[in-house]
Image: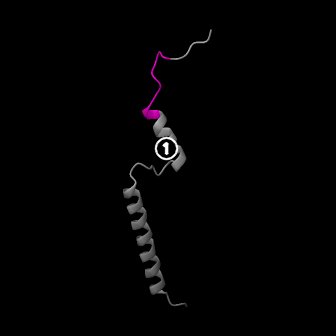
Amino acid sequence: MAKPNYAFEKRQRELAKKRKKEDKASRKASPSQHDDAPEGQAQAGEGAAENPPPAGNTPREG
């Protein structure tokens, strides 16, 4: 039977922790970005929701 390679497993765990820590730091550095939406959609969607056009000031045809 093969002997388990504990050093490899430990290295993989360390790399996973490092990746998770870096991801968390990058999310913390830019809190305005959402994980659910891509960058382009998040920015366009937020701007449209914050500045709706005023009601009653629509141009009329005629």
Local SS, label 1: helix
Is residue 2 found left or right of 49 in the rendered image? right
Tell which residue pokes out farthest to the right in this image: 62
Main SS of residues in magenta = loop
User: Which residue is pictured at 47% across the width and 15% down the height?
Assistant: 56
The x and y percentages for residue 33 are 44, 50
Q: In the depicted view, which residue is nearer to us: 7 or 24? A: 24
Q: In the depicted view, which residue is nearer to us: 24 or 55? A: 55
Residue type for callout 1: Gln
- Say above or below: 7 vs 60: below
Q: How many marks?
A: 1
User: Which residue is pictured at 51% across the width and 40% down the height?
Assistant: 44
Q: In what quadrant of the picture does the N terminus appear?
A: bottom right
Q: In the depicted view, which residue is nearer to us: 58 or 15? A: 58
How many residues crowd mark 1 within 10 Å: few (<14), some (14–19), many (20+)? some
Tell me the residue that label 1 is attached to. 43
- Say above or below: 15 vs 40: below
User: Which residue is pictured at 44% across the width and 31% down the height?
Assistant: 51
Image coloring type: one colour
The span shown in magenta is 49-57
The x and y percentages for residue 5 are 49, 87
Is residue 13 found left or right of 40 in the rendered image? left
Reply yes or no: does residue 52 show up in magenta. yes
The x and y percentages for residue 39 are 51, 49
Q: In what quadrant of the picture does the C terminus appear?
A: top right
Q: In the depicted view, which residue is nearer to us: 15 or 2? A: 15
Reply yes or no: does residue 56 show up in magenta. yes
The x and y percentages for residue 8 are 48, 84
User: Which residue is pictured at 54% across the width and 90% down the height?
Assistant: 2
